[in-house]
Amino acid sequence: MSSNKFSRRSFIRTSSIGIGALALGPALSSLAASSKPGKKLGIALVGLGYYSSGQLAPALQHTENCYLAGIVTGTPAKAVTWAKQYNIPQKNIYNYQNFDEIAHNPDIDIVYVVLPVFLHKEYTIRAAKAGKHVICEKPMALNAKDCEEMIAACKKADRLLSIGYRLHFEPHNMEVMRLGQQHIFGKVTKIDTGNGFTYNGDPNAWRLKKALAGGGGLMDMGIYSIQGSRYTLGQEPIAVKATQEKTKPELFKDVDETVFWELEFPGGFKTTGKSSYNHDWSYLKVEEEHGKFEIGPAYGYGGIDGSVNGKQMSYPQMVQQAAQMDDFVKCVNQNKQSRVPGEEGLKDMKVVDAIYRSLDSGKWEKIG
Ligand code: NAD
């Protein structure tokens, strides 16, 4: 795909390959039509924008342990469309003013926060206080301090918190975790990763406002590159040095466009990563002493591919979000921490905070 044609919309198209392929199965249409969820837990999506409508609601037609039980929206017209499309009863539809009444709704077990980043903290805390378990989209919050408040609020309410890190349930990425963390070909000697797309959307969107998004490509796409290094090694970085490039200062006047960084891990090992709203990147390349492996596209919703020592990986495409939500339900039922808990989002935000400090100082900055 040529870079100037790439946009979030084409990212959606590429990504929907996985869902599209699966959506043909007969079992799924019966699931979609199911109005008797049985013991499935009910999920309410908060914020019905691009990700909820294009990915999560469709994925909830593929889940085994949960279903789309409710919605929270500020747009009455969306409430009507969604109620009809997904058979959602009026009593399970909320707006941002009456959201806290969700506490009294036994149909809703889990609240999934799919709002602009600046609202993640508020709605995660309100959901936990309402007695609901919470999944919050990435990036977890505007900064690490907010992440800590969210984790504390969920602990206090005795509710589980998970971050929408779907790639922890995706087989190519899981294989990279195994090969890296278990040193299958010896010590890891090199990691390079990048994630980005060419933003050609609304110049006034919340994504381009620092107060609402926390930053630009780094917050939105860089989170995946940071995750990639962290889950390949299974270690936490201790310091970072970052630089940036801005070729469209008018569009990205308030947020970062392209950021490059080096992460230092305990023992001095360094990885390279990058993020962008102006380059189409999606790869994770790893070298070990006696072998190498890579994935690319690495971080989308579908079409993920990769190789190990030059041999193509042969994992199926799957609905990552369905696996992610089903797994969280298992955690809720077993009262155990998700493999992607709030603490995982916090670790990434500590790295992000340090990258922004390094961009300001021009120096290596400690993480955490
Ligand atoms: P979006 O702009 O399409 O949708 C955001 C929704 O929030 C809209 O429906 C909007 O009406 C609503 N909203 C409520 N209050 C708002 C306010 N004050 N300002 C602006 N919007 C408000 O965004 P999106 O792409 O759906 O992203 C939502 C979240 O999902 C973000 O955190 C994003 O990072 C995350 N996301 C995750 C993935 C993933 O792969 N995990 C992919 C895309 C987006």
Image (cartoon, helix red, strand yellow):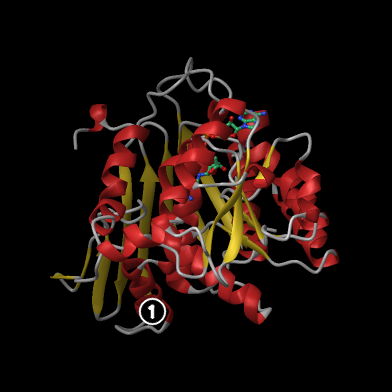
**Residue 151: x percent and y percent?**
75, 61
Q: Residues within 10 Å of mark 1 (few under 14, many from 20)?
A: some
Name the residue rendered at 54%, 26% in the picture. 208
**Residue 329: x percent and y percent?**
58, 70
Name the residue rendered at 80%, 54% in the picture. 103
Residue farthest along the left direction in this orientation = 311
Tell me if residue 51 can be seen.
Answer: no
Ligand 1 resides in the quarter of the picture at top right
Asked if 265 appears above or below 53 in the picture, the reply is: below
**Residue nearer the viewer, 305 or 259:** 305
Identify the element where label 1 is drawn.
Answer: helix
Quadrant placement of the C terminus: bottom right
Name the residue rendered at 54%, 49% in the picture. 241
Please name the amino acid that badge 1 sits on: Arg
Quadrant placement of the N terminus: top left
Image side of residue 241 versus residue 27, left or right: right
Tell me if residue 39 can be seen.
Answer: yes
**Residue 261: x percent and y percent?**
48, 48
Image side of residue 338 versus residue 177, left or right: right
Residue carrying label 1: 178
Asked if 298 appears above or below 313 in the picture, the reply is: above
Name the residue rendered at 25%, 81% in the picture. 290
Q: In the figure, residue 331 lies in which quadrant?
A: bottom right
Residue farthest along the top direction in this orientation = 250
**Residue nearer the viewer, 10 or 182:** 10
**Residue 207: x percent and y percent?**
54, 30
Asked if 182 appears above or below 247 in the picture, the reply is: below
Image side of residue 108 versus residue 163, left or right: right
Image side of residue 98 versus residue 118, left or right: right
